[in-house]
Amino acid sequence: MEMTSGIPFSLSGNNIWRGANKSNGQLMLLHNNHLKVSYSKMVVTAALQAELTAAGKNAVPFGNGVFYDRNLKASQPNTVYAGVPTAAGAIPRLAGIICYDAALDSLQPVETGGVLPSNKGEILKRGFVRFKTAKDSVAGNVIAYADITDDMCLFIENTTGDPIFSVPTSYGTIDAATEEILDPMPVLAGATYAGKIVNLYPEDESVLVELNF
């Protein structure tokens, strides 16, 4: 059986590499219980660009969430959006979390801590991820480690892709007629659920999250 750790980049184009091997059943390696995939193009939405400009930055921070547009599956299959896509007819879905990469960080000595939109990068779809900073609410402030509790969840702010630690406002969408829970995922208005807190590290005030979306 052929195994792969991911589909390689097309270094000269905006699409992923298209090989001749189209066989079904190709096993993707789950390295240390995580799944990491690449993207070819990143689009920064207006809300995040305004936030970056106000902070004097250009790079989208590691740990931010990115989305894809299901409506563009055929024409732009490997484009991600830092903040939900807002074009008419867009069907946004959370694609993953921008993965910290020491090599990428070292290649951008002028501005570390993120990925420049002009660069290609990788996103995490499954696994355990550590966070040092996040917001306390949608359009909120940086949350202090002392205020983070294990009943909070990781949410991704829809407009910017910024990470948020918050207690959900509800759990799932309820059918008004039958009162049946249609979607059991935790809910926070203006944000998308990304995972649950599994451990807190007081030694360095970091938070371990298991991605689940």
Image (cartoon, helix red, strand yellow):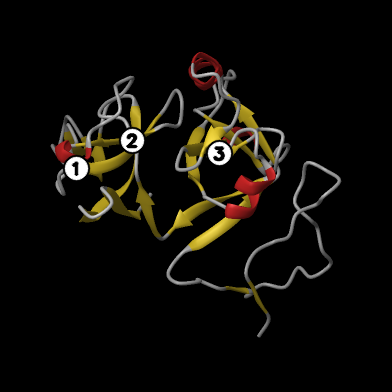
User: Residue 202's mark?
Assistant: none
Ranked by sequence position, the earlier of labels 3 and 1 is 3
Q: Residue at point 58% right, 53% down?
A: 102
The residue where tag 3 is placed is: 114
The residue where tag 2 is placed is: 134
Measure how far apart labels 3 and 1 are at the Cα level.
Answer: 25 Å
Label 2 is placed on what type of residue?
Ala
Q: Residues within 10 Å of mark 2 (few under 14, many from 20)?
A: many
Ranked by sequence position, the earlier of labels 1 and 2 is 2
Q: Residues within 10 Å of mark 1 (few under 14, many from 20)?
A: some
Most foreground residue, 49 or 59: 59
Q: Residue at point 45% right, 31% down?
A: 161
Q: Is residue 181 left or right of residue 123?
A: left
Most foreground residue, 5 or 175: 5
Q: Residue at point 26% right, 26% down?
A: 137
Residue 75: x percent and y percent?
73, 37
The residue where tag 1 is placed is: 152
